[in-house]
Amino acid sequence: MTVHHNHHDINVPRFFIFGAGALLAASLVAASVSKYADVGRVTVPQGAVIEERALRFVPREDGSVQILEADGTEAGIMAQEQAGFLNGILRGFNYERRMAGVPNDAIYHIVRREGDRLALVAPALGRDIDLRGFGDTNFDAMWRLLTLGRDKK
Protein backbone atom coordinates (compact mmCIF):
# COMPACT_ATOMS: atom_id res chain seq x y z
CA MET A 1 0.00 0.00 0.00
CA THR A 2 1.44 3.36 -1.01
CA VAL A 3 0.65 6.68 0.53
CA HIS A 4 0.20 9.50 -1.92
CA HIS A 5 1.25 12.97 -0.73
CA ASN A 6 0.23 16.11 -2.52
CA HIS A 7 3.16 18.56 -2.26
CA HIS A 8 0.96 21.50 -3.24
CA ASP A 9 -0.83 21.45 0.09
CA ILE A 10 1.90 23.08 2.15
CA ASN A 11 0.49 25.18 4.95
CA VAL A 12 2.58 28.13 6.04
CA PRO A 13 1.52 29.76 9.28
CA ARG A 14 -0.10 33.14 8.73
CA PHE A 15 2.22 34.98 11.11
CA PHE A 16 5.21 34.04 8.86
CA ILE A 17 3.47 35.51 5.82
CA PHE A 18 2.46 38.66 7.71
CA GLY A 19 5.96 38.94 9.20
CA ALA A 20 7.59 38.70 5.75
CA GLY A 21 5.21 41.34 4.41
CA ALA A 22 5.89 43.63 7.36
CA LEU A 23 9.66 43.22 6.90
CA LEU A 24 9.36 44.06 3.21
CA ALA A 25 7.21 47.11 3.92
CA ALA A 26 9.59 48.33 6.65
CA SER A 27 12.57 47.93 4.29
CA LEU A 28 10.85 49.98 1.58
CA VAL A 29 9.89 52.72 4.04
CA ALA A 30 13.44 52.87 5.47
CA ALA A 31 15.00 53.06 1.99
CA SER A 32 12.56 55.80 0.92
CA VAL A 33 13.13 57.87 4.05
CA SER A 34 16.89 57.50 3.65
CA LYS A 35 16.79 58.64 0.04
CA TYR A 36 14.47 61.61 0.41
CA ALA A 37 15.57 62.81 3.86
CA ASP A 38 19.28 62.38 3.04
CA VAL A 39 19.70 60.20 6.14
CA GLY A 40 22.32 57.47 6.19
CA ARG A 41 24.01 58.61 2.99
CA VAL A 42 27.77 58.51 2.75
CA THR A 43 29.25 61.33 0.71
CA VAL A 44 32.78 62.42 -0.12
CA PRO A 45 33.40 66.05 0.79
CA GLN A 46 34.08 68.11 -2.31
CA GLY A 47 37.07 70.43 -2.22
CA ALA A 48 37.34 73.79 -3.91
CA VAL A 49 37.45 73.75 -7.71
CA ILE A 50 40.97 74.38 -9.04
CA GLU A 51 40.34 73.79 -12.73
CA GLU A 52 37.31 72.94 -14.82
CA ARG A 53 36.81 72.13 -18.48
CA ALA A 54 33.50 71.85 -20.33
CA LEU A 55 33.52 69.13 -22.99
CA ARG A 56 31.27 67.06 -25.22
CA PHE A 57 32.03 63.42 -25.95
CA VAL A 58 31.12 61.75 -29.23
CA PRO A 59 31.59 57.95 -29.24
CA ARG A 60 32.78 56.71 -32.64
CA GLU A 61 32.17 53.44 -34.48
CA ASP A 62 35.76 52.22 -33.94
CA GLY A 63 35.47 52.54 -30.13
CA SER A 64 37.41 55.80 -29.90
CA VAL A 65 35.84 58.97 -28.52
CA GLN A 66 35.94 62.37 -30.20
CA ILE A 67 36.40 65.12 -27.61
CA LEU A 68 34.84 68.50 -28.42
CA GLU A 69 35.09 71.81 -26.63
CA ALA A 70 31.80 73.27 -25.43
CA ASP A 71 31.76 75.49 -28.55
CA GLY A 72 32.04 72.43 -30.83
CA THR A 73 35.70 72.72 -31.85
CA GLU A 74 37.63 69.48 -31.66
CA ALA A 75 40.00 69.14 -28.72
CA GLY A 76 41.22 65.68 -29.71
CA ILE A 77 40.42 62.01 -29.96
CA MET A 78 40.81 59.39 -27.25
CA ALA A 79 41.97 56.16 -28.88
CA GLN A 80 39.95 52.98 -28.48
CA GLU A 81 42.62 51.45 -26.20
CA GLN A 82 42.20 54.32 -23.74
CA ALA A 83 38.50 55.03 -24.19
CA GLY A 84 36.93 51.89 -22.68
CA PHE A 85 36.31 53.46 -19.28
CA LEU A 86 34.96 56.68 -20.78
CA ASN A 87 32.69 54.73 -23.15
CA GLY A 88 31.31 52.78 -20.18
CA ILE A 89 30.49 55.95 -18.27
CA LEU A 90 28.94 57.52 -21.37
CA ARG A 91 26.68 54.51 -21.94
CA GLY A 92 25.34 54.85 -18.39
CA PHE A 93 24.86 58.61 -18.72
CA ASN A 94 23.24 58.27 -22.15
CA TYR A 95 20.72 55.82 -20.68
CA GLU A 96 19.94 58.25 -17.85
CA ARG A 97 19.65 61.11 -20.35
CA ARG A 98 17.14 59.19 -22.46
CA MET A 99 15.05 58.45 -19.36
CA ALA A 100 15.19 62.14 -18.31
CA GLY A 101 14.62 63.52 -21.83
CA VAL A 102 18.02 65.26 -21.88
CA PRO A 103 19.80 65.46 -25.28
CA ASN A 104 22.90 63.28 -25.71
CA ASP A 105 25.04 66.23 -26.79
CA ALA A 106 24.73 68.02 -23.44
CA ILE A 107 28.00 69.22 -21.94
CA TYR A 108 30.06 67.39 -19.31
CA HIS A 109 32.57 69.01 -16.99
CA ILE A 110 35.92 67.56 -15.98
CA VAL A 111 36.54 69.17 -12.60
CA ARG A 112 39.84 69.17 -10.71
CA ARG A 113 39.42 69.89 -7.02
CA GLU A 114 41.92 70.51 -4.26
CA GLY A 115 43.66 67.40 -3.02
CA ASP A 116 44.09 66.19 -6.63
CA ARG A 117 40.50 65.00 -6.78
CA LEU A 118 38.95 64.69 -10.19
CA ALA A 119 35.28 64.43 -11.07
CA LEU A 120 33.18 63.95 -14.17
CA VAL A 121 30.09 66.13 -13.78
CA ALA A 122 26.92 65.86 -15.85
CA PRO A 123 25.12 69.10 -14.92
CA ALA A 124 22.01 68.24 -16.95
CA LEU A 125 21.55 65.14 -14.78
CA GLY A 126 22.80 66.58 -11.51
CA ARG A 127 25.46 63.83 -11.37
CA ASP A 128 29.00 64.21 -10.04
CA ILE A 129 31.28 61.17 -10.18
CA ASP A 130 34.53 61.18 -8.22
CA LEU A 131 36.99 59.38 -10.49
CA ARG A 132 39.62 58.41 -7.90
CA GLY A 133 37.79 55.19 -7.03
CA PHE A 134 38.10 53.76 -10.56
CA GLY A 135 41.84 53.02 -10.41
CA ASP A 136 44.96 54.89 -11.45
CA THR A 137 44.80 53.99 -15.17
CA ASN A 138 41.26 55.31 -15.59
CA PHE A 139 41.97 58.31 -13.38
CA ASP A 140 45.06 59.21 -15.46
CA ALA A 141 43.14 58.89 -18.74
CA MET A 142 40.47 61.28 -17.47
CA TRP A 143 43.11 63.63 -16.00
CA ARG A 144 44.63 64.03 -19.49
CA LEU A 145 41.30 65.44 -20.68
CA LEU A 146 42.05 68.62 -18.73
CA THR A 147 44.88 69.54 -21.13
CA LEU A 148 43.96 67.59 -24.27
CA GLY A 149 44.30 69.75 -27.40
CA ARG A 150 45.36 72.89 -25.57
CA ASP A 151 48.90 72.70 -26.97
CA LYS A 152 47.46 73.23 -30.49
CA LYS A 153 46.14 76.69 -29.66
Image (cartoon, grey):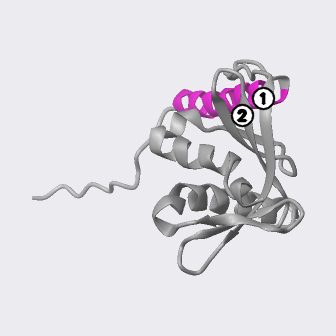
What stretch of residues is rendered in magenta? 14-36
CB atoms of marks 2 and 1 within 8 Å: yes
The picture quadrant where one finds residue 71 is bottom right
Location of residue 56 in the rendering, given as x and y in whole percent from the top left corner: 78, 61
Residue beneath the point at 75% across and 38% down: 111
Q: Is residue 21 magenta?
A: yes
- The residue closer to the viewer here, 85 or 39, is 85
- The residue closer to the viewer here, 98 or 21, is 98
Q: Which residue is at the far bottom? A: 61
Q: Does the magenta stretch include residue 55?
A: no
Element under disc 2 = strand
Does label 2 or label 1 sit earlier along the sequence?
1
Residue beneath the point at 45% across and 64% down: 81
Q: Which residue is at the far left? A: 1
Q: If the image is split into quadrants, where does the N terminus sit? A: bottom left
Q: Which amino acid does label 1 sit on?
A: Ile
Q: Residues within 10 Å of mark 2 (few under 14, many from 20)?
A: many
Location of residue 54 in the rendering, given as x and y in whole percent from the top left corner: 82, 51
- The residue closer to the viewer here, 67 or 135, is 67
Q: In this view, does 110 lie above or below 107?
A: above
Location of residue 59 in the rendering, given as x and y in whole percent from the top left corner: 65, 71
Q: If the image is split into quadrants, where does the C terminus sit? A: bottom right
Q: In this view, does 9 lie above or below 72?
A: above
What residue would you read off at disc 2? 112
Horizontal relation, residue 100 to residue 136: left or right: right
Disc on res. 50:
1
